[in-house]
Image (cartoon, rainbow, N blue to C red):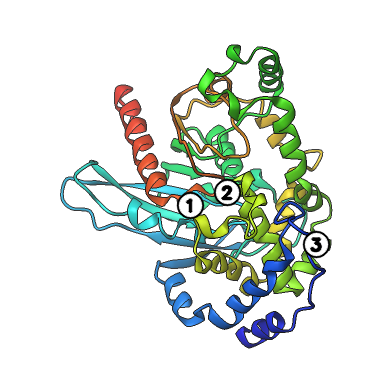
Amino acid sequence: MIKDLKSRLSNHRKPAPGLEGAAFTYGFNSGRLSWWTRYWSEQYPFLEREQFLNSLPQYVTNIQGLDIHFIRVKPKAPKGVTVVPLLILHGWPGSVREFYEAIPLLTKASDEHEFVFEVIAPSLPGFGFSQASNRPGLGPYQMSMIFKNLMKRLGHEKFYIQGGDWGAVIASAMAIYYQENILGYHSNFLFVLNGYSMVRTLVGAVLPSLVVEPHLASRMYPLSSHLAFLMEESGYFHLQATKPDTIGVALSDSPAGLLAYTLEKASSGTMISNKLLDDGGLSLTYTSEQLVDNLMMYWISNSTTTASRIYTEFFQIDNILMVLDKTTTEVPTWGLQAKNEIIYQPETVLRVKYKNLLGVTTLEDGGHFIALEKPEEFARDVFRAVTAFRRFHRSRHVV
């Protein structure tokens, strides 16, 4: 497989020259493609990275007919320190690779906290080494049932959840449907999409002070600029929500294509102004090894097509998640809002759905892939949130 991959990278067709000064504004800068393909083929330390990716304990179990791959790290907890279960969920174009730097921080006991985490990080069905469905209908809601049952299989009737991107959509569904099981929900992509949130957003376009604190107003307004950003950056979304198998053929056959398609989203998702930089600003936040590690998750498992289908399943007419957006939850919740996240909503909007929103941490930097970008800040905030969740339950005499 590696020999074939290197051959494809070395013999990829030369792309059309990029426009002068375009950088990443037209998409991936084709002038950077040869550097990346040479790096992946000739410099990426395959054996060393294989050992790194295998450094965390990994398992496969069958849940509802699908083989689900997951990382499970149990901490060595000293006497007096409670071990609590935490399910963390990734999204697209990420993978469990996003959590490799954060997991050691979450599973290490310290004097600062009376608890430490047992971390369970599954690959979503159709992503990485988790089996894809061979029938239509496996969307985020159905995945929420799979992961609830995974945790039960592992002996955890009650547990905490964390999610970003699609992981946030799945975790939010779990926080609504399994309120007796979910002890707390932490998300770095907390949002509400219903009539109220839309009306509040429109009102704020006229009078921002009625909706959002002045120092945070630029994260939402002017509305025209933010809508223009979403339109510009959501072309992939429409494509994958309608014809995932078509784009899947191209990306599954060409590692150079997969690289360009994925890294362009990594660039814009980290900071929109990165598109003005020749290399997309990727080297400012990530190492080349980190980015190619994630690509390997898709290439080795040939999961590009099946992972893209989550977008299509989400937008089915009978999608129950559209109903869930109008449903509230009593599960204690905490948000982590990076400055460069693609969506920002103030607490007044979030509380309409998340009735026990205990807090929101607002960062002055960071983007959509915060666990990989800033693992220390990510882990610190998860500890902060679960401390609040445990206090919340103690005040109600709930274990």
* Snapshot quadrant of residue 399: top left
Query: Among all residues in the image, which is located at the extreme left?
Result: 79
Image check: 130 left or right of 390?
right
Furthest residue to the front?
A: 20
Q: Nearer the viewer, residue 278 or 243?
A: 278
SS at mark 2 in the image: helix
Mark toward the start of the polypeptide (3 vs 2): 3
Secondary structure under badge 3?
helix
Point 72% across, 38% down: residue: 229
Q: Position of residue 143 (x, y in %)?
A: 62, 49
Q: Quadrant of the N terminus?
A: bottom right
**Where in the figure is residue 323, as x and y percent of width and height?**
70, 30
Q: Are marks 1 and 2 in contact (CB under 8 Å)?
A: yes
Question: Does residue 50 lie above or below 157 as drawn?
Answer: below
Label 1: how many Cα within 10 Å (few below 14, some 14–19, many 20+):
some
User: Closer to the camera: disc 1 or disc 3?
Assistant: 1
- Observer-nearest of 94 and 374: 374
Name the residue: 66% across, 50% down: 276
Neighbourhood count class around disc 3 (C-alpha, 10 Å): few under 14, some 14–19, many 20 upward = some
Q: Quadrant of residue 75?
A: bottom left
Q: Earlier in the sequence, mark 1 or mark 2?
A: 2
Left or right: where 75 falls relative to 226: left
Q: Which mark is residue 373?
A: 1
Residue 247 numbered mark, or none = 3
State how many labels appear. Answer: 3
Q: Residue at x 29, y 27 (%)?
A: 394
